[in-house]
Amino acid sequence: MTVWIVRGGLEGRFEHQFVDKSVVALAWETVPDYSRFHDREALKDWYRGFFPGAKEETIANHVGQLYAFLNTASIRDLVVLPFKNRDAVAIGEITGDYVYNPDLIIDAPHVRTVLWLRTGISRTRFDTDLRRALAARMTFSQSRVPDAERRFRMLANPPTT
C-alpha cells in the first residue's frame, strides 16, 4: 500500500468538504473528465491543449499529479490530509476509483471516495520525518518516508489498552 499526501485547496478551502463528503478531490476545474488516459504521455499532450502557454516543468508536475490520482493511487491506499489552518491531520483509506463529478464539490471535480479512519489528529503526535512529509507542496503526492503506511495506520488506529 502507498501513502498519499493530499492538499485541501488554496487556504484549505476544500478540507471540510473532503471530510464531510468522504472524498479527496483535485481542483483542476478547467480540466474535464480525463478518465480515459492511462498513458502519461497521451495525458500530457491532451493537457497542453488547456494550458498552451504553460512551461514544460509545470505541465510535467501537474500531469504527474493528475496521472497518479487516476492511475497510480489504489483502493486501500492511505490518504493523509493536513489541515491548513489548524494543527490537525485526517487519515483515510481510498475506497473508490476516480470519478469526474463537478457537482459534488464546486471547483474540485476530480474525485476519489475515502473512508476517513480518523480526523483531527494533532501534528504533535507525528514523528519529525512524518511532519516533514506533510509539508509537501504538491496537491497530491506520494510519501517517500520509510515505513510510512504502518506508522500512519498506527496513528489512525491507535492500539487500545
Image (spheres, helix red, strand yellow):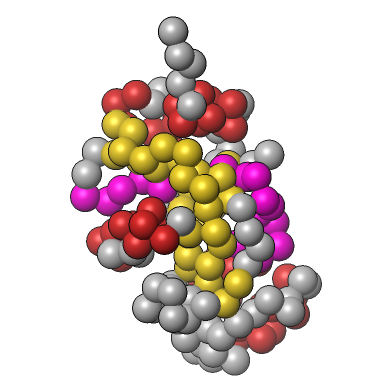
Q: Is residue 25 left or right of residue 20?
A: right
Q: Foreground: 136 or 32?
A: 32
Q: Is residue 77 in view from this perspective?
A: yes
Region of the chain picked out in magenta, as a range: 68-85
Report the residue that reaches farthest toward the top. Answer: 161
Residue at 47% over, 39% down: 117
Q: Quarter of the image holding residue 12?
A: bottom left
- Quadrant of image for the C terminus: top left
State yes or no: residue 20 in magenta.
Answer: no
The vertical placement of 5 against 131, above or below, is below
Q: Foreground: 87 or 65?
A: 87
Residue at 59% over, 51% down: 94
Residue at 60% over, 82% down: 33
Coordinates of residue 106 in the picture (x, y in percent): 37, 78
- Quadrant of image for the N terminus: top right
Report the residue that reaches farthest toward the right. Answer: 39
Coordinates of residue 87 in the picture (x, y in percent): 24, 38
Q: Foreground: 20 or 28?
A: 20
Q: Is residue 138 in view from this perspective?
A: no
Report the residue that reaches farthest toward the left. Answer: 85
